[in-house]
Image (cartoon, grey):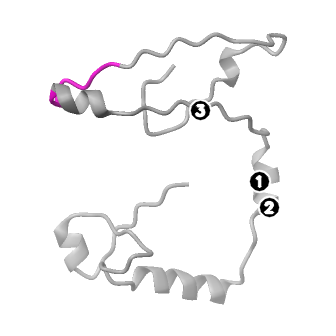
Amino acid sequence: LRKRRDAPLDITECIPTYQTDARFKVTIQQDPKLAYSANQRLHYVLAFVVCTPKEPADILAEVPVENCEQSSTRIKSILCRKEDEDDLQISGGSDEIDADTRSLRLTC
């Protein structure tokens, strides 16, 4: 399995359909960059979530569609917001934030 910790792991392909139980071994390694006392205070979360798989076409069918004018207005309002507004996070270098361009980090 992947070791990336910021994205969910799909374990479906690791479990055969006929198998009704599964064993997992989780190893937590201490971060060598943190002091010993900080490592002791760290908490980890492990969750198993049952999801219903959907085809891309089924997901697209559930997405509401706005007309072009509404979409354009919404995108312009997002791009014109100021850096200190709480409801939008703008990331990028200081040259991007101070200039006329905005770099938006979107997570889907």
Q: Main secondary structure of the magenta part?
A: loop
Q: Between residues 20 and 16, which one lies in front from this camera angle? A: 20
The magenta-colored residue range is 29-35
Residue 11: % across, % down: 63, 23
Identified by mark 2, the residue type is Glu
Q: Between residues 85 and 81, which one lies in front from this camera angle? A: 85
Quarter where residue 44 is shown? top left
Residue 34's place in the image compared with 81, above or below, is above
Q: Which residue is mark 1?
A: 59
Asked whether residue 96 is drawn in magenta, I would say: no
Mark found first going from the N terminus, 1 or 3 = 3
Which label sits in the foreground, 1 or 3?
3
- In the image, 32: left or right of 16? left
- In the image, 66: left or right of 8? right
Quarter where residue 63 is shown? bottom right
The kind of secondary structure element at disc 2 is: helix
Tell me if label 1 and label 3 are in contact, CB under 8 Å. Answer: no
As drawn, the label of residue 35 is none
Q: Residue at x 29, y 33 (%)?
A: 41
Q: Which residue is mark 2?
A: 62
Which label sits in the foreground, 3 or 2?
3
Q: CA distance from mark 1 to mark 2?
A: 5 Å
Q: CA distance from mark 1 to mark 3?
A: 24 Å
Residue 7's place in the image compared with 61, above or below, is above
